[in-house]
Image: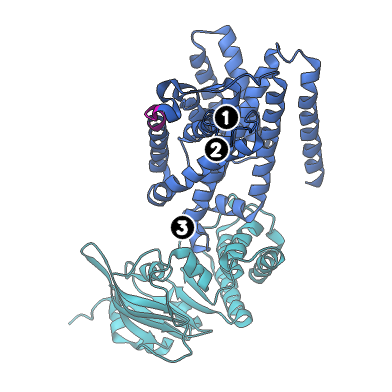
Chain colours: A cyan, B blue
Amino acid sequence: MVSTSKEELLRLEGIYKRFGGLEVLQDINISIGPEEIVGLIGPNGAGKTTIFNLITSFYRPTQGSIFFNGKNITRLSAHKVCHRGIARTFQLVRTFSKMTVMENAMVGAVFGKTQIGMQASHNAAEALELVGLANKKDNLVAHLTLSDRRMLEIAMALASMPSLILLDEPMAGLNSAEIGNLLKVIEKARDERKLSFLWIEHKVDEVLDFCKRVMVLDYGVLIADGSPEEIANNSKVIEAYLGEPSA
Amino acid sequence: MKDMKTFYTGLVALIVLGLIVVPFSVNVERSYLIYFLFMAFIYVVIAQGWNVVGGYAGQISLGQHAFFGLGAYTTAMFWVHGLLGTGADYYFNPLLMILSGIVPAIVAIIVGIPLLSRLRGDYFALGSLGLGEIIRVFFVKGGDITGAQDGLHLPSGGYESMLPYYFVGLLLAVLATVGVYFIMRSRIGMAFRAINEDEVSASSHGINILYYKILAFAVGAFFTGVAGSLYGIYIFHVNPDSVLNINYGLYPILMCVLGGSATIFGPVIGSFFMAGVFVIAEQHFPMIHPIISGALIVLVMRFMPTGIVGLKSRLQRD
């Protein structure tokens, strides 16, 4: 499953994560290429967000290594991982609510790749434009809807000029119109910016429709990795979601 | 927005101008007003120091009195031991006053690395409180170098007038406020606010949280140390009870919170307000004045949770 081609952005190699006696992840091997949108699905507690927290260095793996652009990033601190070009969003949105929309985007732009002055405000404005929040740039984030905050979080990620964005359940709590809007923004971001996405989602149908490649995590083990068709017909996946067939 | 900004700039300029004129309309050497304003200026500087670290960066330091004392002691030790050379003029020496800010800032960096990397929130607050005690013991046990419990007596022969104290105090208060304004408009200020709101999010957006926390701690220590230096020059007798008094750790918090922390003018308003409260309570209720001051603080917090500065926006909303 581990590819060694040069066309590789992110690689997780034999990752294990234990919290005390609880084995959360076992031997996870993942490889993501440039301009790929990869869905990561699995039942509650499968360890999806833990994978994100390992990639972004909020946790250290018990065992295994993480490579980004061919360089080992396993032991970097969280802010340095961001400087290398990995941005993320959070399951429970973590925008800065006492700041304006523009200031939030500026945080992403200024500290992401440590740019100053005009370039940073240009990147921030462009990111807001891309997600459609340009007209709300002076609003206080505390007054935004959930959907706008999720968009803003994506804009903050985009403003840091990353090459990979980790999305942690960006659709949670959104209605179908807002979801449609979100999918458009993600596609646009990939096409305009040549970005890759690793995308955790609970809404399996949307992921299978949208992503060309999907991975399934169950109880800390990666049980499938392939096209949506392969995933939909994989007996292990069906078992994980629907339970074992009755004898 | 633009009009409001010009209005406030004008108002501030007018107030500062008024404060410059005050000494020429009263008998400086006898006026209580001059002393009152001088103390208020010192409060403004230490309140702005806490405003940076506690208000904007959200690191609740209870140990600012350590930096105040350290600033006063730096001035006193350099002066008494003649460390700037024998011919040097130590009275209001700007170099010495800046140095008295740098020493606490360096201590803040050294102490901040273990304190801020390991302790968060309440635990950092308690850790910083411990810092104040450690510094106090250090000076009490310092022997001849620190003058032990009796402290250091500065040569007071140079004293001629209250006027230089007043103007240096005013200058420092203005510089501290302008300094905070520019820090908060810069990327450093942006990092402070982000860390205050959400450390996890801040670090995921590329902000080195430890670096900026220590920077905030050091900037706050610098302000407080310079204020301590001025106060030391004023009292001419630097000892643990006078300059390492925990009041200098608690007053700035009170003043920031009352005036409105994490705002530019909140700490200024809070400083003048508290200085006024202290005076009134002391005059009219000499024995129980801390009770009166305390009760007033409770009342203000009950009815103005966002501070005096926050009152305006609260009234507009209602």
Q: Which residue is mark 2?
A: B50
Instruction: Please check whether the numbered discs 3 and 2 fall on a single chain.
Output: yes
Q: Quadrant of residue A145?
A: bottom right
Q: Is residue B106 above or below residue A236?
A: above
Q: Element type at marker 2?
A: helix
State the predominant SS element of the stretch in magenta: helix
Mark whose residue sits in front, 3 or 2:
2
Q: Position of residue A149 (x, y in %)?
A: 57, 60
Which contiguous range is marked in magenta? Answer: B138-143
Residue farthest toward the bottom in the current orientation of the protein: A5
Q: Earlier in the sequence, mark 3 or mark 2?
A: 2
Picture mark count = 3
Q: Earlier in the sequence, mark 2 or mark 1?
A: 2
Instruction: Please check whether the numbered discs 1 and 3 fall on a single chain.
Output: yes
* Left or right: B305 as drawn, with respect to A67: right
The answer to whether the residues at label 2 and label 1 have Cβ atoms under 8 Å apart is yes
Q: Which residue is mark 1?
A: B255
Front residue of B108/A190: it is: B108
Q: Residue B200 got which mark?
A: 3
* Left or right: B286 as drawn, with respect to A57: right
The amino acid pointed to by label 1 is: Met
